[in-house]
Amino acid sequence: MLARAITHALVGLDARRVEVEAHLQGQTPSFTIVGLADRACQEAKERVRSGVRSAECEWPLGRITVNLAPASLRKEGSGFDLPIALAVLGASGQVPRDELERHAAHGELALDGRVRAVAGVFAVAEGARRARLRKIICAATCAPEAALAGVEPVPVWHLAEAVAYLRGELEPEPVAARNGAEPPSWPDLADVRGQERARRALEIAAAGGHNLLLAGPPGTGKTMLARRLPGLLPDLDSEASLEVTRIHSVAGVLRAEHPLVTSPPFRAPHHTASAPAIVGGGRGPRPGEASLAHRGVLLLDELPEFARPALEALRQPLEDGVISVARAEGTALYPARFQLVATMNLCPCGARGDPAVACSCSAQRLAAYANKLSRALLDRFDLLVAVPRPRARELAGERAESSQAVRARVLAAQAALASPPRRSDEANALLTRAVERLPLSGRGRSRVARVAATIAALAGSGVVGPQHVAEALSYRAPKELTSL
Ligand SMILES: Nc1ncnc2c1ncn2[C@@H]1O[C@H](COP(=O)(O)OP(=O)(O)OP(=O)(O)O)[C@@H](O)[C@H]1O
Ligand SMILES: [Mg+2]
Ligand SMILES: [Zn+2]
């Protein structure tokens, strides 16, 4: 007897249809799975056999061969357990085969038959929708995520429920697509006293999606400021929302109760994070922090503390907005168009840039510190800002402007930037002079031009004037940083 279950395998963020065929013949007991990686196959066999017994079904007597087709496709993850188990039960006549073929199924089995959540159910369900399957049998905790993809989920906690459902003995619980996400609560800019210049740069960064580096002595509010950037950004539009949800699903970081991501993601990996953790890789391969920050903010707090390979790996996505992750049969492409905000001290002891304290770093240590940040990486920051120690008077002052007020200006500027402003002749002349004087790289020039356009938009000006270019240039090479 032959039975077939349908599921999907992920290739990057793409779901490819996989048919799980189970063939039962003869009397000699054996169980073979072909079409899976060797180790995964052995593990799946154990879980499936044990799961089926725990679901009060019979493990069929005879030679069972399971084939995951197409064989050429590399299948990773444990989501194939459930369709394999159902196909085996179909082949032995314990669930109706025609019903089975009308459904997608995806989930991991525990040894006691419970169905476990796996990463990527949103993307898998999208595949099921494209394959015109109306329903997907999946772990109950993944059901809201599957529903978002426009496929009716059949939520199950245990393999026994999936069996009962396919036999028509159990009605699945209806699951509504949960579009209403919980608005995140970001800390408020009103908490940051003084630091007018850094606040201004933060507003420009938010309005234009520019990369921002805040540098200065310890305890001046750099981390505070950086963490307040996401609160200045607009919500994601519906297309971006689905795109980010897909990435977060594949990485397994969606929240079960609010699977739809509607606000710009904010990721702040620790400085001990490895290059694969930041740009992606490993098994799957999994998207990294840079992809999880797609259409949102990536904060690298204490930039020079990050391993140099991790920082260098960010150069490609900072330029192209995508990351290619090497895998056995070619490369997977993950989107990674994020806004980078970073903080740093000006020297290892932290005193540099602070008139009240003397720096105790040796010339050697200073050089090693500066060496950690390549010119190529620094060139990708549009806004470099020195954050000095605030005056006592500033710290004692009134609460500053709130995030809400700044966000309103950011949204207006973004609307204006939808039609890029023209540059005046004087603005062009100033830009040309700066290329030679600073000097600016080709990349630097176009980045300054973009920042100037953002500044003009914030000022409500339809034309980029020399004053806008001048301000943009002032963030390009502050002396505190160029002397590093
Ligand atoms: N400008 C400021 N306004 C209000 N509070 C501030 C300011 N600067 C620092 N603080 C206070 O100091 C604490 C530390 O600030 P923060 O972590 O942002 O410093 P930092 O510049 O990132 O320092 P480090 O270089 O050591 O990481 C904050 O939690 C806040 O209580
Ligand atoms: Mg800090
Ligand atoms: Zn120092």
Image (spheres, rainbow, N blue to C red):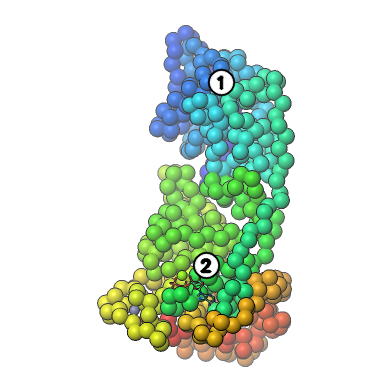
Residue lying at the far front in this picture: please name it: 396
- Answer yes or no: disc 1 within 8 Å of ligand 2: no
Type of amino acid at the residue the image marks with label 1: Ala
Residue 333 position (above or below residue 5):
below
Residue lying at the far top in this picture: please name it: 27
Q: Secondary structure at mark 1?
A: loop
Q: Secondary structure at mark 2?
A: strand
Q: Nearer the viewer, mark 2 or mark 1?
A: 1
> Where residue 55 is drawn, which disc sits there?
1
Quadrant of the drawing holding the C terminus? bottom left
Q: Which residue is disc 2 drawn over?
A: 340
Residue at figure coordinates x 65%, y 73% from the top left: 402
The percent position of residue 318, horizontal first and vertical second, equals 50, 65
Contact check, label 2 and label 1, Cβ < 8 Å: no
Residue at figure coordinates x 56%, y 37% from the top left: 117
In the picture, measured across the screen, residue 174 lies left or right of residue 220, that is right
The tag earlier along the polypeptide, 2 or 1, is 1
Residue 233 is at least partly visible in this image = yes
Residue at figure coordinates x 61%, y 44% from the top left: 256
Q: Nearer the viewer, residue 332 or 184?
A: 184
The percent position of residue 355, horizontal first and vertical second, equals 41, 87
- Answer yes or no: disc 2 within 8 Å of ligand 2: no
Alpha carbon separation for disc pair 2 and 1 = 49 Å
Quadrant of the drawing holding the N terminus? top right
The percent position of residue 347, horizontal first and vertical second, equals 36, 77
Q: Quadrant of residue 308?
A: bottom left
Q: Quadrant of residue 227?
A: bottom right
The percent position of residue 212, horizontal first and vertical second, equals 52, 73
